[in-house]
Amino acid sequence: EGQSEPDRATNIQAEASGQVVSVSAARGDLVTAGQEIGRIDAETIEAQLRQAQTQLDQARRDLNNAMALQDRGVATEDRVAAARAAKAAADAAVTAAEEQLENTIIRAPFAGRLYDMTLDEGEFVDAGNVVAEVLDNDPLTVVIQVPQQALSRIHNGQMAQVRFITGEERAGTVSFVGANADQQTRTFRVEVTVDNPDSEMPAGLSARIVIPTG
């Protein structure tokens, strides 16, 4: 007997603070890696980016002028170095503003199904707030506990037949055999991987697993 678990699960956190201006996914939706699920107001950051780009344009002109004057023997190396430093600082400011702007878009880190979605349009979120959880159920991992006397007959790559409590049967493959026994039960964790297209089978289902060992 065993139980299915998601292949991976993680919380999605807001990376910027502000008011939520749009929500583009709902709890239970299937999402792709990088898909936008919400957006935070970016008006202030967009203004900062425009200012940084203006300062970068000016820094480029100053550097070009300093280099031209140096070629004519008018400007010193110190003036050129100062202009280069100013341009580098302006470049960094633009990059930082672009990263902050990107952080206003809340994205799914990998493909899966949204779970515990709490993002609502109009609410205020702080950077670091958990706004959703995404579960990747493809493939499913079915976990069983194998008695120590049977462990030697279980190996990675073995085929397995999994019958879920729902009555559905799927073929699986042994993908992990534990090397350390549970201290209470003296059994070993074994994982069977089962393909689960479109995450149609949920995690948490009980199942019976048969592994032919000869």
Image: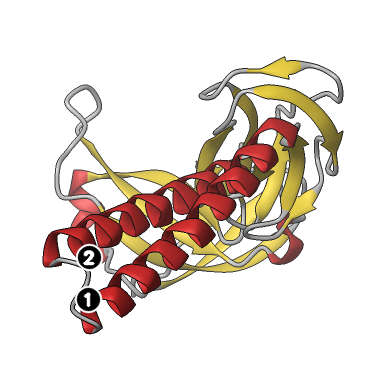
Against 41, residue 176 (above or below) is below
Q: Quadrant of the C terminus?
A: bottom left
Measure how far apart labels 1 and 2 are at the Cα level.
8 Å
Element at badge 2?
Answer: helix
Say above or below: 76 vs 52. Answer: below
State left or right for residue 153 relative to residue 55. Answer: left
Image position of 144 (left or right of 161): left
Furthest-bottom residue in view? 71
How many numbered badges does the structure rendering display? 2
Q: What's the colour scheme?
A: secondary structure
173 lies above or below 199: below
- Residue shown at 61%/67% (left/top)? 195
Q: What residue is drawn where x is 31% and y is 68%?
A: 66
Residue type at mark 1: give it.
Gln
> Can you tell which mark lies on residue 80?
2
Dot 1 alpha-carbon crowd within 10 angstroms: few under 14, some 14 to 19, many 20 or more: some
Q: Which mark is residue 70?
A: 1
Type of amino acid under label 2: Val
- Quadrant for residue 196, please give it: bottom right
Label 2 crowding class (10 Å Cα cut-off): few <14, some 14-19, many 20+?
Answer: many
Closer to viewer: mark 1 or mark 2: 1
